[in-house]
């Protein structure tokens, strides 16, 4: 097996907890510790043996961490932490604000390059594994169309939007891909699909005392951008039902490329994920890319990189020769 | 767009014809010509404008070809041509005898390295895109199982075996994945599947004059290795039906990784191909990898490489910055 890769976790929410679980599944890795902005004593890790430190003490662990996995959010945390920490550590993060990726890439690239560190940004599944499949799909079938469907899954952003509606005491939103639309895409006919045709949205809502269900429902389904372009169903449930039936964070989706290699022949490539836990899967992707980042850094590949720059073999604990013999 | 990549085709069967069609779909490529061991004048290319040369004249076109795509077979052609041509050209091939890949890799690596050429071996879909997905799957879900299903598709090797049975005048064999088995895998239960449970085999056979259908059927279904481990159906048809209904070469399959990221949560990754033309899709993969090989050679990556060594972004005609902005 060779050397052990030493991992640090910066930030400990659902994603950080997922990374703690994923490191344990990889025999060539060990966890140096969790770094938090909370009081370290207040944080309860998955495993009682996991060390917990203050984020402000990170610099003292430079020699004990091969790759630091940044588990903060894309809105508030990563724009600050990404560039700052890439000046001290090899890093992996899940920055997922698609429109700001080029700007974030540049912000991280400079400090990483100056410190001879490798910083892999925007790993996960979208951006991440879906991006990889969009690139492969376009390259293999240049005369084609790409379709991305999300769900069935809990959408954090849309759930937040539901909970902000006056009269809502609690709730969740699931994004559901339309089977009819998927079937059209799978048969290779390359349909033009409107936003409304691709997904439906399903909300489970707990009403606040005295709230009017009709008014709440109307406010949700007509909400600009979030719901008005979709067919949305609203179900009212009790607080007990919400707690009992909607705690899991399933997600997933499909990335499909449909194209023609000649006038006679259509070809369809489909990549799909069915995830019982979105944060645990995202964490597993970050951890696999931490292995690749460690190796890229050893090869002298400094600066910012993305999943599109990483050869698949670098994610595996197996050697290139073993991969050729066993998995090619 | 920048420079044009000049492609040569060595060998012109179904795969070579597919490469001729695929080059046309890629605006940054042009075809220098087809090289054949037949009489060039006897070969009819897809497009009347395509140049056809004798294989023995290849050396004269060294300066006119950036990447030579080897379209010969894995049994007779590539073991000779691969090492020989990698000493003169950057190459891409579809060597698909899984058990001999390490040996073939070594045979190609030496000459390519000595001549500062880049030789990508074993591209296509299996080995190829399925291999990539096996590697990603293992790395992302180390506590998991990988399942590969092939079909529904025409199997060349099994069709050949059927045609060698005494009393058979013609025939084809389709490999069909079992829906029951696929459903078990998709639900994340990580079943143990016997060979017989995963695929069934369906043969369409034209009898020779006076042949005994019962004897032919028995000879097929009991054939060691090819059919005895499977449930096999044999249908007798006329020569006209064979010619009319079984000329297409559809194929495809699924590579599924099912794993657990914690005791509570199962995750399923699925990669699937539905191909109306197996050779045209394989050709499209080879052509996309030709672009990557051209770039790898320019970067100084000499010797043999496989799809597992190639970053996804190198397959795209788009720049890394455009890919980050548009597809990540």
Image (cartoon, coloured by chain):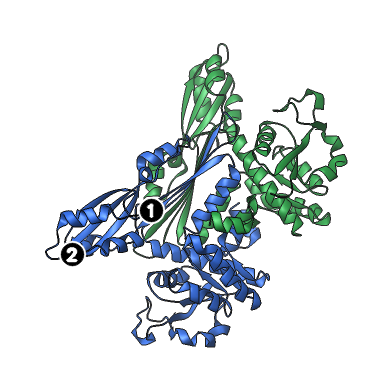
Chain colours: A green, B blue
Instruction: Give how far apart the Cα atoms at labels 1 and 2 are.
Output: 30 Å
Q: In which quarter of the image is residue B243?
A: bottom left
Which secondary structure, mark 1?
loop
- Image position of B194 (left or right of B206): right
Residue A188 image label: 1
Which x, y percent locates residue B181? 39, 40
Residue B239 image label: 2
Residue B70 seen in the current view: no
Q: How crowded is mark 2: few (under 14 residues within 10 Å), some or many (20 or more)?
A: some
Q: In which quarter of the image is residue A109?
A: bottom right
* Residue extending furthest toward the right: A60
Q: How crowded is mark 1: few (under 14 residues within 10 Å), some or many (20 or more)?
A: many
- Image position of B149 (left or right of B292): left
Q: Nearer the viewer, residue A166 or B33?
A: B33
Disc 1 sits on a residue from what chain? A
Q: Residue at x 48, y 52 (%)?
A: A146
- Image position of A291 (left or right of A256): right
Q: Which of the two marks, 1 or 2, is nearer to us in this view?
A: 2
Q: Residue at x 66, y 41 (%)?
A: A26
Give the answer, above or below, for where A232 lies relative to B111: above
Which x, y percent locates residue A326? 54, 54
């Amino acid at each position: 097996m060779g050397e052990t890769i030493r991992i640090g976790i910066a930030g400990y929410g659902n994603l950080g907890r997922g990374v703690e679980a994923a490191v344990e599944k990889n025999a060539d890795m060990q966890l140096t510790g969790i770094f938090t902005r909370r009081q370290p004593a207040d944080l309860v890790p998955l495993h009682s043996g996991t060390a917990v430190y203050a984020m402000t003490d990170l610099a003292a662990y430079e020699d004990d961490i091969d790759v630091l996995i940044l588990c903060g959010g894309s809105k508030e945390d990563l724009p600050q932490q990404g560039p700052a920490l890439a000046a001290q550590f090899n890093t992996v993060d899940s920055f997922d604000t698609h429109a700001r990726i080029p700007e974030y890439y540049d912000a991280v690239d400079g400090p990483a390059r100056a410190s001879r560190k490798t910083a892999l940004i925007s790993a996960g599944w979208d951006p991440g594994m879906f991006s990889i499949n969009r690139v492969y799909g376009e390259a293999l079938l240049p005369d084609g169309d790409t379709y991305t469907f999300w769900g069935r899954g809990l959408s954090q952003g849309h759930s937040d939007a539901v909970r902000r509606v006056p009269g809502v005491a609690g709730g969740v939103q699931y994004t559901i891909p339309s089977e009819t639309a998927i079937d059209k895409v799978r048969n290779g006919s390359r349909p033009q699909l409107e936003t409304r045709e691709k997904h439906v949205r399903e909300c489970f809502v707990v009403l606040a005392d005295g709230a009017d269900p009709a008014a709440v429902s109307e406010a949700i389904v007509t909400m600009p951008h979030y719901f008005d372009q979709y067919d949305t169903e609203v179900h009212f449930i009790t607080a007990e039902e919400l707690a009992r039936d909607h705690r899991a964070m399933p997600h997933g989706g499909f990335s499909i490329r449909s194209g023609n290699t000649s006038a006679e022949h259509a070809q369809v490539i489909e990549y799909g994920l069915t995830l019982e836990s979105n944060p645990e899967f995202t964490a597993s992707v970050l951890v696999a890319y931490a292995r690749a980042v460690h190796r890229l850094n050893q090869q002298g590949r400094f600066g910012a990189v993305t999943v599109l720059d990483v050869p698949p073999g670098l994610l595996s604990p197996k050697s290139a020769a073993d991969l050729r013999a066993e998995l090619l």
